């Protein structure tokens, strides 16, 4: 964020002051354009929700086109590159379409979809952990990155996923949304349906656990020492 302060030098030239005023106006116009863009998205969401609630079939496809990438990214960043992400993505949109009548604030569509994605991810993590305890997964069955990174980066990602697996479900989700997806604490709280104070506590605890466990992973421990 930038601020415009009065000059401390009384001898500023008139044209410099005029130039500063021009920059302020330009900045205001940029902010107005950004606000206009946000308003356009909100307005578009309200129209889309109305059509979905009216049962318009084409609207379901538009919902996926508009927010499919966002929901897919939430699932990936929460779970890692799981093989089941495609199925979960489908489930999120099915749940959204089936429950769209319960969305009272159409302007909150994106956040509402995020919360459904988080709920689906939480359920998947808990189911997978139960299956793991029953021996249906081998110890080396870890997420495979979607892209083809270098062997060292790939090994580090696998190690990071192993660390994330050790975190309590709610802490893992809060940590992933905050630091991998980059949501604000308020957005994480809305997605998780939890108070901001609770989310802050979860994130702090997750950070502590993550670094504690990461130090036990040789590769991650080396990266932490190097400040990577």
Image (cartoon, rainbow, N blue to C red):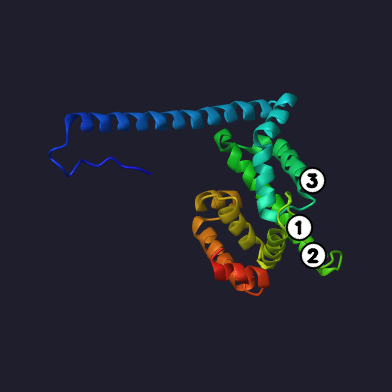
Q: Is residue 56 visible?
A: no
User: Which residue position holds label 2?
Assistant: 130
User: Distance between the Cα atoms at labels 1 and 2?
Assistant: 17 Å
Residue occupying the far left of the picture: 10
Say which of marks 3 and 2 sits in front.
Answer: 3
Say which of marks 3 and 1 sits in front.
Answer: 1
Report the number of discs. Answer: 3
Q: Earlier in the sequence, mark 3 or mark 1?
A: 3
- Quarter of image, res 63: top right
Say which of marks 1 and 2 sits in front.
Answer: 1
User: Which residue position holds label 3?
Assistant: 87
Q: Secondary structure at mark 3?
A: helix
Q: Are marks 1 and 2 in contact (CB under 8 Å)?
A: no
Instruction: Count neighbours of disc 3 (C-alpha within 10 A) and say few if under 14, some if 14 to 19, many if 20 or more.
Output: few
Q: Secondary structure at mark 2?
A: helix
Residue 29's spot in the image, x, y percent? 38, 28
Q: Earlier in the sequence, mark 1 or mark 2?
A: 2
Residue 45's spot in the image, x, y percent? 59, 30
Residue drawn at point x = 46 percent, y = 32 percent? 34
User: Distance between the Cα atoms at labels 3 and 1?
Assistant: 15 Å
Instruction: Count neighbours of disc 2 (C-alpha within 10 A) and say few if under 14, some if 14 to 19, many if 20 or more.
Output: few
Quarter the N terminus occupies: top left
Q: Closer to the camera, 74 or 193?
A: 74
**Vertical placement of residue 88 versus 208, above or below:** above
User: Which residue position holds label 1?
Assistant: 143
Q: Earlier in the sequence, mark 3 or mark 2?
A: 3
Q: Closer to the camera, 122 or 52?
A: 122
């Amino acid at each position: 964020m930038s601020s415009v302060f009065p000059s401390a030098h009384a001898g500023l030239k008139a044209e410099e002051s005029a130039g500063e005023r021009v920059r302020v106006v330009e900045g205001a116009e940029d902010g107005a354009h950004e606000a206009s863009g946000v308003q356009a998205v909100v307005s578009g969401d309200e129209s889309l929700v109305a059509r979905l609630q009216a049962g318009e079939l084409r609207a379901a496809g538009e919902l996926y086109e508009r927010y499919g990438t966002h929901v897919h990214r939430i699932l990936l960043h929460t779970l890692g590159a799981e093989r089941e992400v495609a199925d979960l993505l489908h489930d999120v949109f099915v749940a959204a379409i089936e429950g769209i009548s319960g969305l009272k604030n159409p302007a909150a569509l994106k956040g509402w979809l995020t919360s459904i994605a988080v709920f689906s991810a939480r359920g998947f993590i808990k189911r997978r952990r139960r299956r793991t305890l029953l021996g249906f997964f081998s110890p080396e069955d870890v997420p495979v990155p979607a892209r083809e990174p270098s062997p060292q980066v790939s090994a580090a990602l696998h190690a990071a996923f192993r660390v994330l697996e050790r975190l309590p479900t709610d802490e893992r989700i809060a940590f992933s949304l905050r630091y991998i997806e980059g949501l604000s604490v308020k957005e994480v709280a809305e997605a998780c349906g939890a108070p901001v104070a609770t989310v802050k506590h979860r994130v702090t605890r997750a950070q502590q656990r993550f670094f504690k466990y990461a130090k036990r992973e040789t590769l991650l421990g080396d990266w932490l020492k190097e400040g990577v």
